Image (cartoon, rainbow, N blue to C red):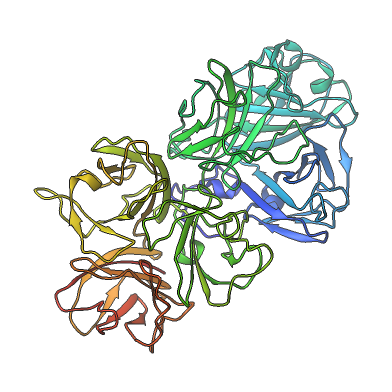
Amino acid sequence: MTLLRNLTGTSPSGEDAANVEDVFSTYIYEGTNSAQTITNGIDLAGEGGMVWIKARDGTVNHAIVDTVRGNTKYLEADSTGAESTTSVGITAFNSDGYALGADNTWKFNVDNAYVSKYASWTFRKAPRFFDVVTYTGNGTAGRTIAHDLGVAPGMIIVKRLDVDGKSWQVFHRTTTGTKALWLNQNYVPTTDIAYWDNTNPTDSVFTVGDNSTVNNSGGSFVAYLFAHDPDGANDDGMIACGSYTGNGSTTGPVIDLGWEPQYVLIKNIDEGTEDWIVHDSMRSLMLTEGNTLRPNLSTAEYNSNSHHQIRATAIGFAPGDANHSVNANGINYIYMVIRAPMMVEPESGTDVLAVSTSVSTNPDWVSGFAPDMGIYRYTLGTNNFLTSVRLAQGRYLRTNDASAEYTDSNASSFDYSNGFGSNVGTSQPSDSIGLLFKRAKGFFDVVAYTGDGVLGRTVNHSLGVVPEMMWVKERSVIGDWTVFHKDLGGAGAGHLKKLVLNDSTAATSSDAWWANTYPTTSVFSVGDYITNTNNGTLIAYLFATLEGVSKVGSYTGNGSSQNIDCGFSGGARFVLIRRGDLIANWYIWDTTRGIIAGNDPHLSLNTTAAEVTTDDSIDPQSAGFTVNQLSATNINVTSATYIFLAIA
């Protein structure tokens, strides 16, 4: 499991979890018809929890398995059926995920002509987040059942286990204990105290009525409890259950949570024809596609350029279309959302950057984590491609030109939990290299926004620290990549300077780029031109220095050799260097191709030139890297100024 700094001082084991990555995971995978292990970092064996699985490309029931009932028992979210048993579904709960058997039910691990892709959501039991409770009904209204959330549940889902024909019952804090709501149906809530006894849950118990679906005498039941704790004790809340009213537009309303979500469950509660809708950051919280799954239906994943679209922002989420499922004018909706994994800083550079050669098919470049940005390049010479994973699935930008966004559903596919790129079963050429970046607090973030043309406009981000280097590109039209670096200077009487990623021109200054304003821990400022064109669709990549992981810095050349101290202990695995005061290329080196004592292969992000392997411009150094002055790259000219990004 990825090692992470615990910033709040609390333990993720048996206490309030400090990091959402310890308690929740969306994991997408392909069926194999044989045993496979899903490693998602969630300790189900020690802490307990629930796994919800749905085949994405077939008409197959949702399967729900939990550690309290046991791995061989499953329920179907879209069905009124009783609990079922299988020995080849989830075969074990592990300390870092779960194991799958050779599934013969189609619900877990099949690869055939109808089903091959799966989405899974894992919820770990933890105070202020999630709990699983089983109980035997007594048929008496007002019965209370204990739970361990430590806060009042925001949503409760109850299912009777022992007989068929019983619906899933849902309590939601915004509809209160007076209303009945059904997970397996698209009905609107109705007033009926027989389900929740007109009583809202507390931080220690929830109350049920005498309806047979929640409290039949002698009946067996399971309850899944989701907390409502958006703020937390230290602004570390991870889950929120609330409501909003649609406005019928494609630009809102904006639901302000104070943090970015990675999972959104929504239900229209005014119209009885609209399904429950599930979006997550691995499949569907993107700039265009919906990729909707519906808990009350067994149908395959629905994909559309706008239908059911939800947009995640750095502070919450907003519906991206006027469809009745998410944003009809004047219609009320309830939601349950889970925070994105930008809460805790990574410990190691290998947790957030992978440098991969093409060694696999689907995905083409393997990372060992779910990447959020990928750059790939053929080292023999061709265009550089860049794409942001979960925000721009199937689209890419070229770092060496100013072109608008291109479409390629294969080369820019991030439909994996361990890499990117899908070349339809054929691996990429052996001369290719992939750089895979993971968003993480204090290290790297990706932000999409729409320009308004107003000088000084601020854009929210989730980096948690001040961005020290930013790349901004308009996606919809031709326009240069604009680069901010903290050490380029120019503020005050002048203007903050910018470089262009797709060419070699020297730095220039103007209010039009950064509004002469340095970024902060929560926002960055843009001007009124290429970083903020009115109605332009823009994307920004933000980098920062994180002790032992990354370094955004600068140095002055000495004409020979010098060590660049990044504060690392094992040297830099990736280095990007650009001269800031004159015309120069954006050079990159990495240890996969070779940062060694001899010649070091390098590429340039702003050109289509083939990899150069005949010079020794950079050498390994434990605290960072060493630069040597050679005419091939000129990365250490006397008195010249250079900016760099290095990752351990």
Residue in view at x 24 percent, y 67 percent:
554
Image quadrant holding the C terminus, namely bottom left
Residue 193 visible at all: yes
Image quadrant holding the N terminus, namely bottom right
Specify whether 211 is left or right of 473.
right
- Depth check: give the residue in front, 366 or 563: 366
Residue 318 versus residue 401 in the image, above or below: above
Residue 567 visible at all: no
Q: State the image coordinates of residue 210 (x, y, percent, origin top left).
A: 80, 15
Specify whether 113 is left or right of 623.
right
Q: State the image coordinates of residue 109 (x, y, percent, origin top left).
A: 79, 53
**Residue 303 appears in which quarter of the rendering?**
top right
| Tally of numbered tags | 0
- Depth check: give the residue in front, 470 or 207: 470
Residue 156 versus residue 639 in the image, above or below: above
Specify whether 317 is left or right of 181.
left
Specify whether 82 is left or right of 228.
right
